[in-house]
Amino acid sequence: MADTQQTLTALLALLADNITEAISAQDVRDIVETLRNGHGEISVSITSTSSYFPDAGTYTLSANDHNWDMSTNGQLRYIGTAPRAMIANCSFSMTSAGNNQVAELVITKNGTPLTPSVVRRKIGTGSDVGTGALHAFTSVVNGDYLDVRIRNTTSTANLTLETCNLFAMDMAL
């Protein structure tokens, strides 16, 4: 039988009273599967972007575990069976087509910005390569996806993400 993620509530109910000694070896394997953290990571080298949207660069699924995949370019998707808490981190480097541009980046879940992750970076000289990091904490269910979006809050000058790495780690709720 396949090992299966369960909700913590279901596992605690099973373990609450084992007077009947009904906990099987499979139940123990399911507990281990549920408590195992999963992770996924995508990265990209990008050539151009402008308004607040996911970038059109070619992403690579550079690391994954049993709970994550990238079925759509640029979207790190949770494919586990049980709802999970999730921590996401993103590092990036960027330039601008203009001087004194303010870039805003955010991690989104299913296209909706995770507002606490928003960072702003002023690019004084367009050719300067600047770096930054984003962080987010949320919960995910099967099919939820994460991505990084960017916009220029100063003008319509293009922003260029040179590198972008999005990493997510899930844990039992």
Image (tube, helix red, strand yellow):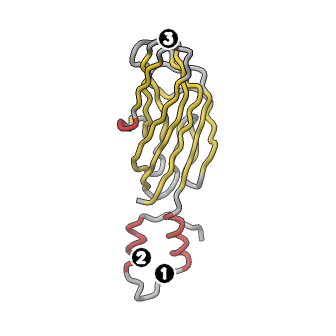
Q: What's under tag 1, amino acid-wise? A: Ile
Classify 10 Å Cα crowding around label 1: few (below 14), some (14-19), many (20 and above).
Answer: few
x 47%, y 44%: residue: 88
> In whole angstroms, how far apart are the C-alphas of marks 2 and 1?
7 Å
Q: Quadrant of residue 154?
A: top left
Camera-nearest label, 3 or 1: 3
Location of residue 123 in the rendering, given as x and y in whole percent from the top left corner: 47, 18
Location of residue 70 in the rendering, given as x and y in whole percent from the top left corner: 58, 42
Q: What's under tag 3, amino acid-wise? A: Gly
Location of residue 34 in the rendering, given as x and y in whole percent from the top left corner: 49, 64
Q: Is residue 15 left or right of residue 58?
A: left
Q: Is residue 65 left or right of residue 112?
A: right
Quarter of the image with the C terminus in it: bottom left
x 51%, y 46%: residue: 168
First reached walking from the N terminus: tag 2 or tag 3: 2
Residue annotated with mark 2? 14
Along the viewing direction, whichever of 87 and 18 lies nearer the viewer = 87
Say above or below: 62 vs 22: above
Q: What's under tag 2, amino acid-wise? A: Leu
Classify 10 Å Cα crowding around label 2: few (below 14), some (14-19), many (20 and above).
Answer: few
Say above or below: 117 vs 83: above
Location of residue 78 in the rendering, given as x and y in whole percent from the top left corner: 51, 48
- Residue 98 is labelled as 3
> In whole angstroms, how far apart are the C-alphas of marks 2 and 3?
61 Å
x 54%, y 65%: residue: 33
What element does badge 1 sit on? Answer: loop
Q: Quadrant of residue 84?
A: bottom left
What element does badge 3 sit on? Answer: loop
Classify 10 Å Cα crowding around label 3: few (below 14), some (14-19), many (20 and above).
Answer: some
Q: Are marks 2 and 1 in contact (CB under 8 Å)?
A: yes
